[in-house]
Image (cartoon, rainbow, N blue to C red):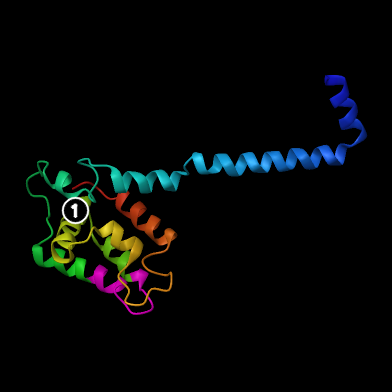
Amino acid sequence: MAKEITKSVAEKPLQWLLVAGVVGSAAYFAFRKLIPKGSEIITRNAELDVSDNNPFSYNKFLSQTIPPNTPLLTVAGSRAAAKQIYDSLNTFFDDDEDIAIGVFNSLSSKLKVAFMCKEFFTMYKKDILEYLKTGNKTFDFGTGGLSTEDYQRILTIVSKKDKF
C-alpha cells in the first residue's frame, strides 16, 4: 500500500499537492474556530471574569477594600463620563468612536472605570460592554456600536491601567 501511494505521488505530484493543500486549508479553517486568538481571550475575560481585578464587573470590583487616600471619581464625574459614552454611540447614523475611546483614556485607574461602569448601568439600565458592541441607533444599517478593533482597544486600555 505504501509503495502504491509513493508511486502515485511520484507520477502525479501536482494532483497530490492540490489534495494536500485542500485538506490542509480545510483543517486550518476548522481549527481556527476552535482555538481562540489572544484578543478573543482578553475580550472573553473582560466580559465574563467576575473578579476584583475586572472593573467591568463593577459590583465585585467595588466590593473590595479601597486603600485610604485613593483618588475617587465623583458621582457627577461618573455620570458625565457615562453620558459622553452613551451620547457618542446614540446617534442616528454615525457613531463617534473617538469620544468613547477618549473617555476610557481619561480615566486614570480601573477603580474610576468601575465607578463609571456602575453609573452607566444606573443611568441607562444597560451593560456598558454590550452597549459598546451594539450602540443605540434609531436606524442601524449593520454599523451599531464600536468596531471590533475599537472595542478591543478599549479593553486593552483598561487592562493596562493601575488598579487604584
* 51 falls in the magenta region: no
Regarding residue 161, the answer to whether it shows in the image is yes
Q: Is residue 90 above or below residue 9?
A: below
Q: Position of residue 64 (x, y in %)?
A: 12, 41
Which region of the structure is painted magenta? 84-98
Q: Quick check: 30 left or right of 24?
A: left
Instruction: Work out whether residue 87 or residue 14 is closer to the camera in this orientation and state it.
Output: 14
Q: From the viewer's perspective, is residue 160 above or below residue 3?
A: below
Residue 55 or 50: which is nearer the viewer? Answer: 50
Displayed quadrant of residue 151: bottom left
Q: Which of 17/146 is in front?
A: 17
Q: Quadrant of residue 133?
A: bottom left
Tell me where residue 49 appears, x and y as whole percent: 27, 42
Q: Secondary structure at mark 1?
A: helix
**Residue lying at 15% horizontally and 63% vertically, measured from the top left:** 78
Seen from this angle, which residue lies furthest right?
Answer: 11
Q: Which residue is mark 1?
A: 114
Residue 36 as seen in the image, left or right of residue 137: right
Residue at the image point whose x is 42% and y is 63% from the top: 147
View extreme (front): residue: 1
Horizontal and vertical percent position of residue 50: 23, 42
- Amino acid at circle 1: Ala
Q: Is residue 160 visible?
A: no
